[in-house]
Image (cartoon, helix red, strand yellow):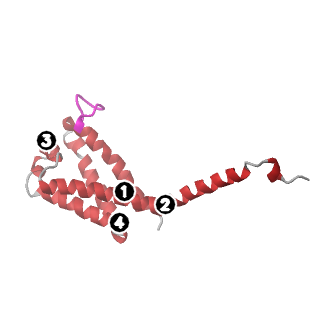
Amino acid sequence: MVEQRELFPMQPIAIRRLRTRGNVAGFARVNRVTLLLRFSLAAIFFWFGMLKLAGVSPVVSLLRNSVPFLSGSPYIELLGLAEIIIAIGLVIERLANQAATLMILHLFCTLSVAIIAPTVVFAPAFPVLTMDGEFLAKNLVLITAGLVVISRDR
């Protein structure tokens, strides 16, 4: 009987492709992906926090139109400092769950602008978003990313 390998000479290439896919899947293991997710979230929060501390954050106008007392000093600086602390916590493995929890709370508070000042978020009416509304909508994705960080397997 003829060996099957002779009838199908392409089989080693197919096996090689499976091994390559296995390597990609191996690289994209949950631990590595969540580490990358944590670092990405940390970079975003660090960046946003630094903009607030430097006094050049575009969020000030959103706050001024919705929750005016938070748009001034020292509150805007405290928000920036909180975001930097969240970023540092996301980078440190043992603090990642607590930092992600704080991040989610922070983002939910930010989303509350849609309830406090709906005209800032929706114009002329729901469901049409303003630019500030689109800015706030991204928080849904960030909240989900925080839930992924919290729920990851160790």
The secondary structure type at the circle numbered 3 is helix
The label shown at residue 130 is none
Identify the residue at horizontal 28%, vertical 51% (top origin): 108
Q: Amino acid at mark 2?
A: Val
Distance from disc 4 to disc 2, alpha carbons, whole Å, reads: 15 Å
Question: Which of the two labelled residues, at mark 4 and mark 3, occupies the earlier sequence position?
Answer: 3
In this rendered view, identify the residue nearer to me: 113 or 26.
26
In the figure, 57 relative to 120: above or below?
A: below
Distance from disc 2 to disc 1, alpha carbons, whole Å, reads: 14 Å
Q: Residue 127, image x and y in percent?
A: 30, 32
The magenta span reads 121-131
The label shown at residue 146 is 1
Q: Residue 74, image x and y in percent?
A: 9, 58
Question: Which of the two labelled residues, at mark 3 and mark 2, occupies the earlier sequence position?
Answer: 2
Query: Mark 1 packing: few (<14 Cα in 10 Å), some, or many (20+)?
Result: many
Which marked residue is nearer to the observer: mark 2 or mark 1?
Answer: 2
Q: Which residue is mark 4?
A: 96
Q: Which residue is mark 3?
A: 65
Q: Amino acid at mark 4?
A: Ala
In the figure, 144 relative to 135: above or below?
A: below
- Direction from residue 81 to residue 99 in the image, left or right: right
Residue 125 shown in magenta: yes
Residue 118 shown in magenta: no
Query: Mark 3 packing: few (<14 Cα in 10 Å), some, or many (20+)?
Result: few
In the figure, 80 relative to 98: above or below?
A: above
Distance from disc 4 to disc 3, alpha carbons, whole Å, reads: 33 Å
Distance from disc 3 to disc 2, alpha carbons, whole Å, reads: 41 Å
The secondary structure type at the circle numbered 1 is helix
Q: Amino acid at mark 3?
A: Asn
Identify the residue at horizontal 22%, vertical 39% (top origin): 132
Q: Residue 84, image x and y in percent?
A: 23, 61
Q: Which residue is mark 2?
A: 30
